[in-house]
Amino acid sequence: MRTILYTGKGGVGKTTISAATALRSAQRGHRTLVMSTDMAHSLADSLGTPLGSEPTLIAENLWGQEINVLDDIRKYWGEVQGYLAGLLITRGFDDVVADEMAVLPGMEELCSLMHLNEKSKQGLYDVIICDMAPTAESVRLLSLPDIIDWYVNKVMTLSKTAGGILAPILKTAMILPGGTVVGAIQDLLSKIDGLKEQLSDPEQTSIRLVLNPEKMVIKEAQRAFTYLNLFGYNVDLVVSNRILPPTLEGSFFHRWREQQNHYRDEVTAAFAPVPILEVPLMEQEIVGLEMLGRIADELFPEQDPAEIFYTGQSHRIYKEDGNFYFEMKLPFVDKTAFNLLKKGDELIVEVGNIRRDIILPRALAHLQPGGATLENGLLKVKFPPA
């Protein structure tokens, strides 16, 4: 089963692109589910049909779903939430406040992602397409399995290590979780492990970035791209949306087109070698299957949207012997024409006529390069500690 996750800055059209991709996938004969994990659902509006918390048949081979987060929290976290809320109440918190605080930050989004793992096990669909939250929230969401894994393991460790004569007293005081809570935590950990395995498998899951050719949008997409590489997720496609068509005339559109052409070059510099697809600005609102079909024609006129367009990480960052290292593949490049520049949190690499602009993560943003090598098509930049 293929899982495709679309994310991008709010307002760039990721819901439209997700829905259009799902429609073309269904037309190709794949049993396709498009689902929204964004707290502010707009998928039903895009498809022009009501959607519920369970998959709804929209067209042949096409189902849609808008996830009910409250139901999911009760399903995946309810037992643990009750335990944590009881613990907070014993510490003097109001019942309602304790119940709210017992839901970990990000648990709503994590629960919605659990649907991916469940649907893959059911075998009812060939392709699942997720319309995710805006970029920054999506990056945090994709790192949550590791964070929650660590958090609940701490609770498990407390339960296992505290024993002897104190254990009954601690359990009575609701400091230690009981058997049903421990079982719920173990079940949650098992689901998280399955989710992590699914999301990090490039043969199964692809993440696709949607952007518009505008400065702030591109920078946010670059940051997301860096962090997705950092966590080992495979970005196989970038979609540049709302490109002005050449048929629009006049000085107003000419200036916008010039600006877009400039930023189209920046998109290539930022995300190559990941393929970049462009979608033109349409003359009307994209609502309903007919208009989504037109977007699908622009996106995937011949290709199967479920195929893997790119595998591999464009760059990686690691720490060794107290230093950070940045590595990027630059095959078939003459190292005699090499230039490296750091500007704020950006690393600009120029080799011959190739330019790459990379947003660095926080761990490297305040550091300065301390040397670079280019050997066998691999650029390696050293960042000594400050």
Image (cartoon, grey):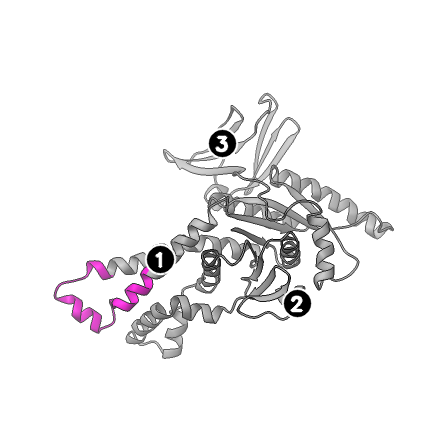
Position above or below: 128 against 40: above
| Residue occupied by mark 1 | 189
Q: Quadrant of residue 359?
A: top right
Is disc 3 surrounded by few (<14), some (14 to 19) or many (20+) residues within 10 Å?
A: some
Q: Kindly identify the amino acid type of the residue bearing the numbered disc 3.
A: Val
Q: Quadrant of residue 347?
A: top right
| Residue occupied by mark 2 | 45
Q: Kindly identify the amino acid type of the residue bearing the numbered disc 1.
A: Leu
Q: Is residue 194 magenta?
A: no
Which mark, by number, is residue 381?
Answer: 3
* Among numbered discs 1 and 2, the one appearing first in the sequence: 2
Overall secondary structure of the magenta stretch? Answer: helix
Left/right placement of residue 225 relative to residue 212 reads: left
The CA distance from mark 3 to mark 2 is: 47 Å
Please state which of residues 145 and 31 is positioned toward the viewer in this rendering.
Answer: 31
The CA distance from mark 3 to mark 1 is: 37 Å
Q: Kindly identify the amino acid type of the residue bearing the numbered disc 2.
A: Asp
Judged from the image, the secondary structure of the residue bearing numbered disc 2 is helix
x, y percentage for residue 165? 12, 66
Magenta-drawn segment: 159-186
x, y percentage for residue 69? 49, 68
Residue 329 in view of the camera:
yes
The mark lying in front, picked from 3 and 2, is 2
Which mark, by number, is residue 34?
Answer: none
Judged from the image, the secondary structure of the residue bearing numbered disc 3 is strand
Is disc 1 surrounded by few (<14), some (14 to 19) or many (20+) residues within 10 Å?
A: some
x, y percentage for residue 194? 41, 53
